[in-house]
Image (tube, rainbow, N blue to C red):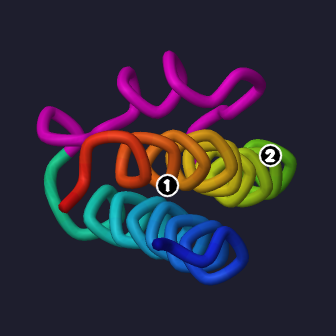
Amino acid sequence: MLNIRVVTWSLSSFTLFSYLVCILYGLIVPESLHMTTFLESVLPGFRWLTPVGFAIGFVESFLWGAYIGLVFTPLYNFFQRRLGP
């Protein structure tokens, strides 16, 4: 059985870390290799290299991880109880 709090915080931290890596990657590589289009599609309100856009992306990345953890963990535990050994 998975602990919902642990999984949710882990996934939130993972998605936030991934967002920061994408931003750092975008600052290092040429513009043609940026993840801008993807980030703007997945994170409503995100705009590349604006303070407000960065903050929105930061918060939304964390919330996407929380959402996944809050949905995945109960589903996993349910199926583990029903179908597990």
Residue 25, x across and y down, in percent: 26, 65
**Residue 77 circle label:** 1
Considering only vertical position in the picture, is 13 above or below 68? below
Residue type at mark 2 is: Ile
Q: Residue at x 60, y 48 (%)?
A: 74
Residue 54 magenta-highlighted: no
Q: Secondary structure at mark 1?
A: helix
> Toward the viewer: 53 or 76?
76
Residue 47, x across and y down, in percent: 65, 33
Query: In which image quadrant can residue 60 be found?
Result: top right
Q: Residue at x 62, y 52 (%)?
A: 61
Distance (Cα) linking label 1 and label 2 = 32 Å
Considering only vertical position in the picture, is 32 above or below 74? above
Using residue 84 as the reference point, say whether residue 37 is left or right of it: right
Using residue 48 as the reference point, say whether residue 4 is left or right of it: right
Q: What is the magenta range?
A: 31-49
Numbered disc in front, either 1 or 2: 1
Disc 2 residue crowd, few under 14, some 14–19, many 20+, Cα 10 Å? some
Image quarter where the C terminus lies is bottom left
Residue 35 magenta-highlighted: yes
Residue 2, x across and y down, in percent: 50, 73
Q: Secondary structure at mark 2?
A: helix
Mark 1 or mark 2: name the one nearer the start of the chain. 2
> Toward the viewer: 49 or 35?
35
Residue 44, x across and y down, in percent: 71, 22
Q: Which residue is mark 2?
A: 56
Q: Residue at x 49, y 54 (%)?
A: 77
